[in-house]
Image (tube, coloured by chain):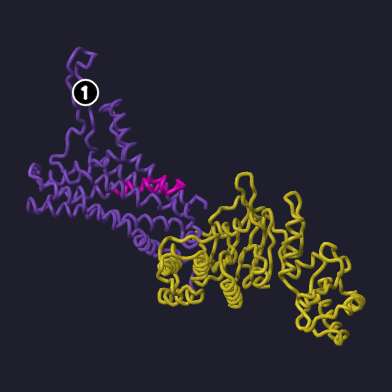
Amino acid sequence: MSETVIKLENLTKKFGNFTAVNSVNLEVHRGETIGLVGPNGAGKTTTIKMIAKILRPNAGKILIQTNHSGLQDLQSVSTTVSKIGFLIDIPNFYNMTGYQLLKYYAKIQRYPKEKIENRIDELLELFKLSEWKHEKTKKYSKGMVQKLGIIQAILHDPVIIILDEPQTGLDPLARIEIRKYIRKLSKLGKTIFVASHMLYEISEVCDKIALINYGKIIGFDTVENLALSLGTSEINCVLLNPLPAEKLAPLLTRMVDRLNPYLDQNLDPNTSEIPIRYNPEHQGLKFYFDGKNESKGEILKILVKEFESDFTIVSFIQPRTTQLERVYSKMVTDNTPEGTIKLTGDDSKK
Amino acid sequence: MRNEDESFIGISPIYHTIIFEMKKQKKKLYFFTVIAILIAVLTGYILQLFPDFLLPQTQAEFFSSGLTFISFITLFAACLFFSGIICSEFNKRTGFIVFPKINKYKLIIGKYLGNLILVVFIVAVFYFILGLFGFLYYGGPINIRIFYSFGFAVLYVIALSSFVTLFSSFMKNVNITIIITLVILLMGFNMADQIINLIFADAFEPLYSLAYLGNLITSVLLNPFPNPRYTEFSFGGMGPPGMGGGDFSFGTWATPSIFMGTTLLLVYIVACFLLAALLFKRRQL
């Protein structure tokens, strides 16, 4: 396993009697993309603010990888953390031009002087803000301010990037661009920490998800492993041609019989009455299976071999977002301040 | 590889913050420079155009009358430049962007010095124009005391700036900070001085008062320096005693001594700024 770059140990933050973050333990390894997911007021931003040293924890520690001696307590590091790039909350800028702001931020973080101009141009180009380079930020739209917020976070090419709700206020195209960029940064070996309640955005880019509610981490693992705790997983199978109505019932019965060992035996009736459903609108089949990777393979194998004459499969995917949505819903429903339910797993117990 | 921690040692971030802050406050600088020029021209030139207006006999007296407005200029400039120096980072939430990038002490030093340079520049412009008129009317050389006065004006404006910065470090709103500091500096200190004078007369010199310490700016122009510094005025009333008759005396402190004034202005500068920096460091967003 790669080295730990951030470690939160029993991190706690209270505002009066209200505990915003309650004994959070979390370990982030180099190169990982972690999603911090939770409802509004769950403690996501407060956790990030403590890592950014904007808030002081009431208890616990934030350990951070330094160049000198491995993990060090953030509070004892007297200098501002220059190796982390932050986007916290909805960004607010001084009323200067985008260029003036970025130049200032690059300089105070000691980005090499000769590279500053190129770096600013490159990022403004990437986020399609080049035309606004010399305009004051008060003229920027909400989405443009958000983009500038992301640019300032990655401007000095930090090793760790922490983004709080980066997609807020962005149009769909910009969201796609940001997802692409996060993936690109991830490939470059950056450690990325994204807090959001936009499950699709998170599930698309993150390796692991930390579920937070009422200030507690109640699950920390990959989407697939978190979904195991649900006991059921979905596979969406899109067909080339629609299934004829008269053949549908016997076909579904045959499929249930044949795939039975791999299907979810204890399917929650609230999710579905039957483990295989046909959706004529999407021309697709939905399978509720036991979540095991081997089962997924077997299901595909059987469908291709034994049902070849009945339909042709165009795509066969396990939707991460839906899984995460279900995990998330379960978490919000089950997790109360009085008692929390552990959804997984090895990592969250660390 | 770049040493991440080392990169934050040194004064480079302070220097960049100074430059950035000066650019940020450009509009205020233009506004106050124009105001300073207008007032200097008004007191130094336009008033002299009126036939009834008598030109003071000496250059020092000319400077002294011209500097009547300097305390107002410095006061308003300090309030408007420094009131938002800390609280705007919290109120406008710009701190979320900048706090993780720079050590808070370096940020406040940079912002403070950046604004200070601008305020001192405005004061210097005022003195320069006044000096120019002084030279025009009285010829050279320029009275050396105008430079002493300038020195005290700079010291005074730094003290005012530290004082306003201190308020900015715990206040929540920029506008309220401006109003409160203006009220304290324009009225609060003067009222307190009057009350202290009435109660203690010459037994207690109001050295706590920034307004009183600011008197050094004009009194240093006087030759000789005021001595005694406490003056008592007596008024003779008409009528029987108790009915407006009898003598009424009222005393006032004209100026602090140069040594005491300088020392206390320095104390104000250091104490207010250090306290402001500590509060800023502790304050959470």
**Residue A63 drawn at (x, y percent):** 60, 61
Image vertical order of residue A319 relative to residue B161, above or below: below
Determine whether, in the image, residue B65 is placed left or right of residue A31.
left
SS at circle 1: strand
> Which residue corresponds to the image point at 7% horizontal and 44% vertical from the top-left?
B51
**Residue A85 drawn at (x, y percent):** 53, 66
The magenta stretch spans residue B160: yes
The chain drawn in yellow is A
**Residue A295 drawn at (x, y percent):** 84, 76
Image vertical order of residue A306 relative to residue B66, above or below: below
**Boundaries of the magenta span:** B157-178
Image vertical order of residue A78 relative to residue B268, above or below: below
Residue bearing the label numbered 1: B249
Determine whether, in the image, residue A238 is placed left or right of residue A83.
right
Residue type at mark 1?
Answer: Ser
Image vertical order of residue B195 relative to residue B151, above or below: above
The chain drawn in purple is B
